Amino acid sequence: MLDTLALVVGPGIIAAVLSSPFLLSGRFRSLFARLPPVRSTIASYLFVAVALSIPFMIGTGIILTTTSTDGAALSNGLLNMAFVVTIAYVAVLPVAASVGLPRVGIDWDPTNYGLGTWLLLVGAALWYSAIFVVPLAFFAFVLALPTG
């Protein structure tokens, strides 16, 4: 049980640390400071980072356990999963943060959701996704190499 928890939470914590430079932005800190239920910047940030790692971890687990042992099939499955999750994050997360949250009463951007906020959110989503995509792409490349 502890191993499973570490496999799910560990990558999210690593991604949180590697994405932490985005917290230098007051807008980004404001977003996490206003998120329920804890309304604490660090606690909310860690919770979101771990939650966002789950689709990558579950997707990887599903691909590795359900795909044939053929290296090329595993490679394609991993790359396709990483691509779909990344596109979903880049398309959905900025919209959810700048349109959805204010509509439910969480007004977090002191600059009124301008272009800078959108660029920050898209950049953060791309960066966060890249933290998972780069190792997965490397692993997929190694799996696709011919054997023997």
Image: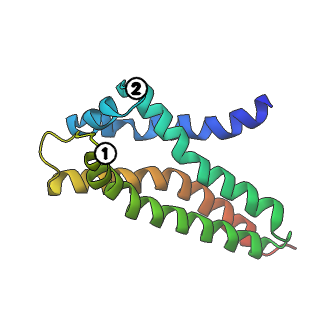
x%, y% of residue 103?
Answer: 27, 49
Q: Amino acid at mark 2?
A: Ile
| Residue located at (69% from left, 70% from top) | 77
Q: Secondary structure at mark 1?
A: loop
| Residue located at (65% from left, 50% from top) | 57
Q: Is residue 25 placed above or below 86 in the rendered structure?
A: above
Q: Secondary structure at mark 2?
A: helix
Tally of marks: 2
Return the residue found at the far front.
104
- Residue 145 appears in view: no
x%, y% of residue 112?
Answer: 13, 47
Judge from the rendering whether residue 49 lies leftward or rightward of residue 105; answer left or right: right
How far apart marks 1 and 2 lie (CA) works out to: 22 Å
**Badge 1 is on which residue?**
104
Q: Amino acid at mark 1?
A: Val
Q: Is residue 46 placed above or below 11 in the rendered structure?
A: above
Image quadrant in which the N terminus is located:
top right
x%, y% of residue 53?
Answer: 56, 46
| Residue located at (28% from left, 33% from top) | 29
**Badge 2 is on which residue?**
42
x%, y% of residue 140?
Answer: 67, 65
Using the rendered view, name the quadrant where residue 32 is placed. top left
Q: Is residue 33 placed above or below 52 in the rendered structure?
A: above
Image quadrant in which the C terminus is located:
bottom right
Using the rendered view, name the quadrant where residue 80 is placed. bottom right
Using the rendered view, name the quadrant where residue 62 is placed. bottom right
